[in-house]
Image: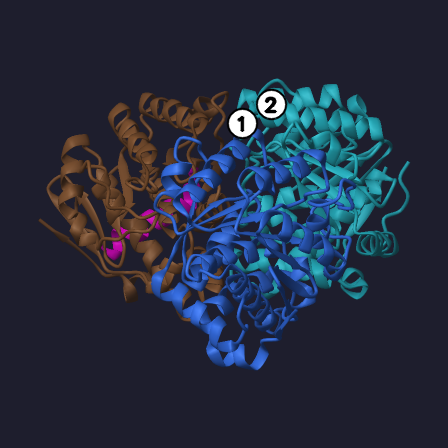
Chain colours: A brown, B cyan, C blue
């Protein structure tokens, strides 16, 4: 279903984002608005944040991708997410959904389910606990941090992929992109990244940018996660802690070279 | 109408902000609240963010300037902006308006127009697309990033200045401050600044701080844009990308010296 | 009432936070959501931000501490704060209240009073003006920055402590933790910290983390303020201004060692 994930395919996506600078409309949480906008700018995309029901359909109307993130949800925002997701489906632009904290509270789990049911997204990216909460009725989550290893969520990811037709990305120490008939395993990244808030949200936002330029969502998601992981490694080598890591990661996204991808990318496609 | 813009006039404004530490009330967008609060603190002002209709008039009542920014607007926030702008007019304190994304959606354009019509601000600062959207019925904007060069918006800025009596600042690679009878051209800044979210919003917030200490709004706006541009240049020389630029810019604002202004300031007043 | 504050007691708390990684539920202001989430992660806690009335009680139900901060309050958020504080009381988990800007507007003062009256928190942390505004009817505050020295608020802190049974922390150049029968004075910190937005909010958030692992609230608060102050000193020595200080402080929290505490901690318990 999806082709090989190679330095060539990832680099092609990076160059496409830098050249086309796709407008990525984000309806996201308050915690990460600044950091995800900066990550999108650093990779070369053009971010816009808009959440009023009065304008989300219009903003989707000029965007190349929509990112929906429920990290600090409330009813008015959920209504805007639904409106925007419907507008995106009608226009045929890709949607990346980040079910932050699904499983932690019934409200989050219910909202994530409703968004999946009503307007199945192109891609879902979450940590293991979140992905598992989307297919089981029992909740394993503890706040917004995962209590499960990514591999434990592979079955859930496959069920989710099958049920909604969405590509499902499970991220953590190892990342997996689950598509129809193929799973991509990515071993980039650095443990210190877990000590910076919202780097999962950043990965989802970058998925939005890559979905905007690559019509194969599994390949686009793999590019986004590889780029995030490689930039995280480069940043961690310069950083003295999570504070500097957050900023150096933006520098690394901006400066990312093909040579760096060649030296560091660790991804394989399995059956 | 406005006097010369000199190292002396800019430095006088910087010293006044540092000495008086004016309280600047911001009703601004979620993306930049942290970064603009930090920029105001770095230059020596005292920022406060408050948006509830229950308190904005009271907060304006103790502030020395009001900054209104529609970057993530919604009806309740727009109502608060209107209340606060009226309170500012009644008290005679300056108001800086940032019409983020005007032209990108009808809701933003309409809101910006309503704010201009009902309570004309002391200053409007926007990128070229935003300023043009405020005078034409056709929208040229693409999200919140400009698709036009600042010089293309000079006619629109002059119309806007004439119609509302507000000083109009158009920022980009070159910045222009359009006042009654004079235009100030500023060539400070660095291209990497466009890869950091909200530096336009930072410029508007700093305009608020300088308007609070300088009764000549064109001169105050010029000081703010020169200071932002010079700090951006200093930061860009240390930075390895947009992540570090964002932080070094705050350091540069805090450490800004008269000698740095003398060495770098590039501004001229034309007819 | 409270025991000695020693390097041992502080280091025990730091180790407990790192080992248990307590889930700290924050209902806080937009300005500091990112920076306080990062501070909590840097010290080893697990932050979650949630403000919808639909979920705050459920989130409190899995959290080990609740942090309530009124920095950008509005009626819907205040309602959520009240719901969450009641749920925390019912579950017996500690609550840290940050009355940001109390005294600056009647709405803030009234809201802070209502939160104190209805669900007395375990701890209140504020600057001198805020703490004084909680016991006097006249407001001395100017925005969210204090116009009074911490020592001027000691009487107010003692009244507040007596009336509500809460530990009261007044922070500034010197910090005081006022408990029943004892006052802890802390002289850590650096003047540049006042030029970074929300470091008071960070101190309150860290109080939440330490309250989650230490049943003696005065001792927990002292640990949080000492850790914040020592990390601020370490950061200030590396920093070239407030921009880099903000990030280096996160690095310092993450890397904090017992030896650093031994070398720098300046705290004493008085009668």
The residue stretch that appears in magenta: A6-23
Sequence-first tag of 1 and 2 = 1
Q: Residue A259 in the image: state x and y as whole percent.
A: 33, 64
Q: Residue B188 in the image: state x and y as whole percent.
A: 70, 52
Q: Seen in the image, is B139 located left or right of residue A84? A: right
Where disc 1 sits, the SS reads: loop
Where disc 2 sits, the SS reads: helix
Q: Seen in the image, is B246 located left or right of residue B93? A: left
Discs 1 and 2 carry the same chain letter:
yes
Q: Residue A105 in the image: state x and y as whole percent.
A: 32, 38
Q: Seen in the image, is B163 located left or right of residue C265? A: right
Tell me the residue that label 1 is attached to.
B104
Tell me whether the residue at label 1 lies in contact with that at label 2, contact meaning CB atoms closer than 8 angstroms: yes
Q: In which quarter of the image is residue B128?
A: top right
Q: Looking at the image, which residue is at 61% across and 64% down? A: B237
Image quarter of the N terminus of chain C: bottom right
Q: How many numbered marks are there?
A: 2
Dot 1: chain letter = B
Q: Residue A59 in the image: state x and y as whole percent.
A: 46, 27
């Amino acid at each position: 279903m999806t082709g090989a994930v190679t330095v060539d395919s990832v680099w092609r996506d990076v160059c496409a984002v830098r050249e086309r600078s796709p407008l990525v409309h984000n309806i996201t949480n308050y915690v990460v608005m600044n950091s995800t906008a900066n990550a999108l700018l650093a990779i070369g995309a053009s971010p816009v944040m808009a959440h009023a029901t009065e304008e989300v359909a219009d903003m989707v109307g000029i965007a190349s991708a929509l990112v929906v993130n429920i990290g600090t949800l409330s009813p008015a925002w959920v209504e805007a997410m639904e409106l925007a997701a419907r507008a995106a489906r009608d226009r045929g632009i890709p949607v990346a959904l980040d079910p932050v904290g699904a499983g932690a509270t019934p409200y989050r789990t219910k909202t994530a389910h409703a968004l999946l049911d009503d307007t199945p997204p192109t891609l879902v990216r979450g940590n293991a606990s979140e992905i598992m909460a989307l297919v089981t009725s029992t909740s394993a989550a503890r706040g917004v941090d995962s209590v499960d290893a990514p591999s434990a969520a592979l079955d859930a990811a496959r069920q989710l992929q099958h049920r909604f037709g969405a590509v499902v990305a499970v991220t953590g120490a190892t990342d997996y992109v689950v598509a129809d008939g193929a799973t991509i395993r990515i071993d980039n990244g650095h443990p210190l990244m877990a000590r910076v808030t919202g780097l999962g949200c950043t990965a989802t936002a970058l998925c939005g940018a890559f979905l905007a330029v690559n019509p194969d969502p599994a390949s686009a998601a793999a590019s986004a996660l590889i780029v995030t992981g490689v930039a995280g490694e480069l940043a961690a080598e310069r950083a003295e802690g999570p504070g500097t890591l957050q900023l150096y990661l933006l520098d690394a996204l901006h400066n990312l070279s093909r040579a760096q991808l060649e030296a560091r990318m660790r991804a394989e496609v399995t059956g």
